Amino acid sequence: MKCQQWLGKASLSNPLLIFHVPNERKASVQYHLKLKRLGVLPGVADYLAFPMNGRKVAIELKDDKGAQSPEQIKFQLFWEHTGGLYFLCRTLEEFQGVVNAITLFA
C-alpha cells in the first residue's frame, strides 16, 4: 500500500501508465478456477508500467525475506525475453528509484 500511496502523491518527470495487478488472493478453488478461465496469469509482477516512448516495465515487490515463486520466475524470463525490463524491489525506496528512473530515461 505504501507504494500505491507514494504513486498517488508522486510528481513524476514524464507521464507513466502504471498499475497494480491484483493477482494474489486467498480464495476457494472454484474462484481460482474461474480466474484462470478469465485469463489471470500466475506469476505476473505486482506492478506493470508503460512509460511514454519507453520499454515496458514489470516490478515485483518482496520483503527482505521473500523469494520469487516458480511462476514469478517464469513470468520474469518471458517478460525479459519479449524485451521488457523486470525489477525486484524490496523496499519503498527501491520502488521509488525504479519508478523515478523509468520516467527520467523513458
Image: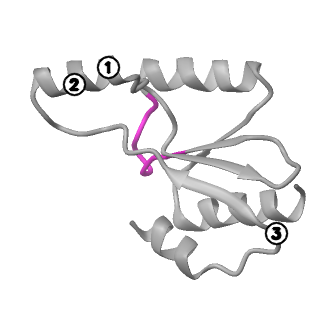
C-alpha span from label 3 to label 2: 37 Å
C-alpha span from label 1 to label 3: 35 Å
Who is closer to the viewer here, 49 or 98? 49
In this rendering, would 77 be left or right of 39? right
Q: Amino acid at mark 1?
A: Lys
Q: Position of residue 92 (x, y in %)?
A: 53, 66
Marking on residue 14 = 3
Q: Is residue 61 magenta?
A: yes
Q: Residues within 10 Å of mark 3 (few under 14, many from 20)?
A: few
Q: Secondary structure at mark 3?
A: loop
Q: Is residue 48 magenta?
A: no
Tag 2 or tag 3, which sits nearer the N-term? 3
Q: Identify the residue at image location x=80%, y=27%.
A: 83
What span is in magenta?
60-68
Quarter of the rendering occupied by the C terminus? bottom right
Tag 3 or tag 1, which sits nearer the N-term? 3
Q: Amino acid at mark 3?
A: Asn
Name the residue carrying label 1: 36
